[in-house]
Amino acid sequence: MNNDSPNDWLKFWSENQKSLFQAWVEGKPPPFAFRGEAPAGDPFKQADQLSDLMRESMSQWANFAKEALSGSGRFDAEAMKKLFDPAEWKRAGSAFDMGLEKLTEGPSYATLWDLDRKMLNVQKLWMERAKDVETYWEVVQGAWNRALERFMKSMNDSKGEPITSGRQMLDLWLACANKALVEMHRSPEFLEAQRKMTRSSTEYRLAEREIAEAFCEMHHIPTRTEMDEMQRTVTELRRELRALKKPKEKAPAKAPAKEKRRAR
Amino acid sequence: MRVKVDPREAMKEFTEFSRRMQAGRELLDKTKDKDVQIATTPKREVWREDKTVLYHYTPTAKQTVKTPVLVVYGLVGRYTMADLQEDRSLIRNLLAQGVDLYVVDWGTPTRSDRWLTLEDYIDGYLDDCVDFIREKHRIDQVSLLGICEGGVFTTCYAARQPKKVKSLTLTITPIDFHASAKDAPPHHGLIGLWARSMSRNDVDRLIEANGNLPGELMSFVFSMMTPVNALTKYNLGLFDVMDDEKKLLNFLRMEKWLSDRPDHPGEAAKQWLKDLYQDNQLVKGDFKLGGAKVDLKKITMPVLNVFAEEDHIIPPKSTQALKPLIGTKDYTELPLPGGHVGVFVSGKSQGILGKNIYGWLKKKS
């Protein structure tokens, strides 16, 4: 049982973190010794090389982010606002969208960060889906607007039957809305929007599955794909079993009945 | 401005609104789950394989129709629609007239059933049910009564196993998946239009992502066909019936059936959407099951084809397309007033549907 006070541990951890970040910023090797056996060669030189690689990489990523997030090339207030404004996330062709596009195409190291790339891909697909959902709702909203226009026109039509109750007015509104919505459901714009939304939602869900499967693999849990494969095998085996059992069980219906009767 | 509301009439309307709300609240308070049970006609399980169960209804009258009838619903929804409540039940109606009835229940498919194909259902489970009935009654042939997608199952089965089918009754069954009348209302046939707006690859990816065709998605698609009705069902629709016990219970039973929509097994859904809805293979003679084309000319037994004149899901033209495609001249059409589900559950069509099917079965059995 360790009797050190939590404050001491917190101080120790904070100091270490501070030293580590300071070393990274200044491009120096970490201030504490590597554990275990030292690698061959000059450890300080190797650490410097690693540090250079990291700095170069960070610099590239920062440039991507700067270009994407701000026209002025700075992380200014406007860029930050866009970054955290949910409305921006689903807007087509936004700075954030383009930024993410570039980030997903950022430097990669062979198979390292594979999961991270999958997550970025999911993020990208989620944004495409959000964009398509927004377009879909724009088409739907257009129908509601047309319904309202028709309703107002009908209400002001002096030649129409008088409306003498609230229910009559409601029924008129609902009839206008239904007509406009059904017309919209047949329109090429709606079919296109619905198709795109379905497609991007599906692709998002499939990409999401890849991440779930990566997690499963990491934690020794069977994946969805593996379960599907197993279930496919079981279905095929059941099918074969049914086929094998069938000729034995399925005697001609009438003949045996007659034979049985004759036997009695 | 057309609005000419008399303040006294408006007050009356408001008073009536308040009265109905109060009466409805009291009725809803005392309504229990047991009051809205559906599919209560007594039956017993006689055969089972995987999730498919064959039930035999307990006879309620002396048998007057020689050949037993097997009722086959599809995978989009449940057979319980044919037995919604005591006074709105095709099943009770036919039993009361002396028809020996069986029904096949496909169960509730889960992800593990995603690989089941239409062949598994038609050549596998359905054929097994027919064989069971043939053996039990020591007969060669069984009469089939298909409903909606189940009508397609029975049509294909009758074409593949004509010797086992005594007569074929189809209700609200799509045959020509692209057919629609030029003067049809705009909300008719939207499912076909939407299915065709997707590519074959879209369908494959949708099933890959979900495993099955989700029942919830199908419910949403159906509700989109009558958008305002779907949006106002639980406020205006409920309000309109909430002070009348009989109407309220009808409403709730219907909702119970609608909400019980199982997932459609994935591979079978691909065939349903791509081969039939998109490519319309059944009427072209290109539809294959187990590698062999389904030849509708092999349907040589008597056929009764029942359709709903106001059916917005399966337009009458889609059903009527069957006549020139089959190999029998013993073909009868029965158009009924009402919509897709209304044919089975509306008070108006109850007597007509049961009476006509019974009369036809008695003649052809």
Image: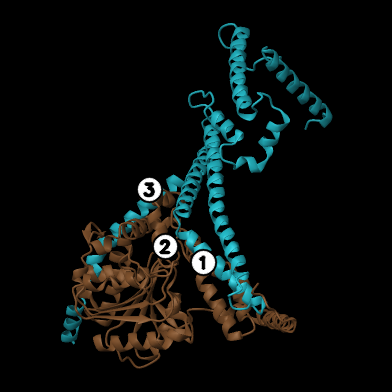
Chain colours: A cyan, B brown
Q: CA distance from mark 3 to mark 2?
A: 18 Å
In the rendered structure, which amino acid carries the disc numbered 1? Lys
Determine the chain carrying the residue at label 2.
B
Residue B102 sits in which quadrant?
Answer: bottom left
User: In the rendered image, which residue does mark 3 sit on?
Assistant: B201
Whether residue B298 can be seen here: yes
Comparing B31 with B115, the one in front is B31
Check the picture and name the quadrant holding the N terminus of chain A: top right
Say which element carries label 2.
helix
Comparing A118 with A50, the one in front is A118
Q: CA distance from mark 1 to mark 3?
A: 32 Å
Q: Is residue A181 left or right of residue B23?
A: left
Comparing B15 with B251, the one in front is B15
Comparing B49 with B9, the one in front is B9
User: In the rendered image, which residue does mark 1 sit on?
Assistant: A179
Number of other residues with Cα within 10 Å of mark 3, as a class: few under 14, some 14 to 19, many 20 or more: few
Q: Are marks 1 and 3 on the same chain?
A: no
Residue A160 sits in which quadrant?
Answer: bottom right
Numbered label attached to residue B191: 2
Say which element carries label 3.
helix
Check the picture and name the quadrant holding the C terminus of chain A: bottom left
In the rendered structure, which amino acid carries the disc numbered 2? Ile
Q: Are marks 3 and 2 on the same chain?
A: yes
Q: Are marks 1 and 3 in contact (CB under 8 Å)?
A: no
Q: Is residue B17 left or right of residue B287?
A: right
Q: Which numbered mark, 1 or 3, is in the foreground of this view? A: 1
Residue A191: x and y in percent read 45, 54
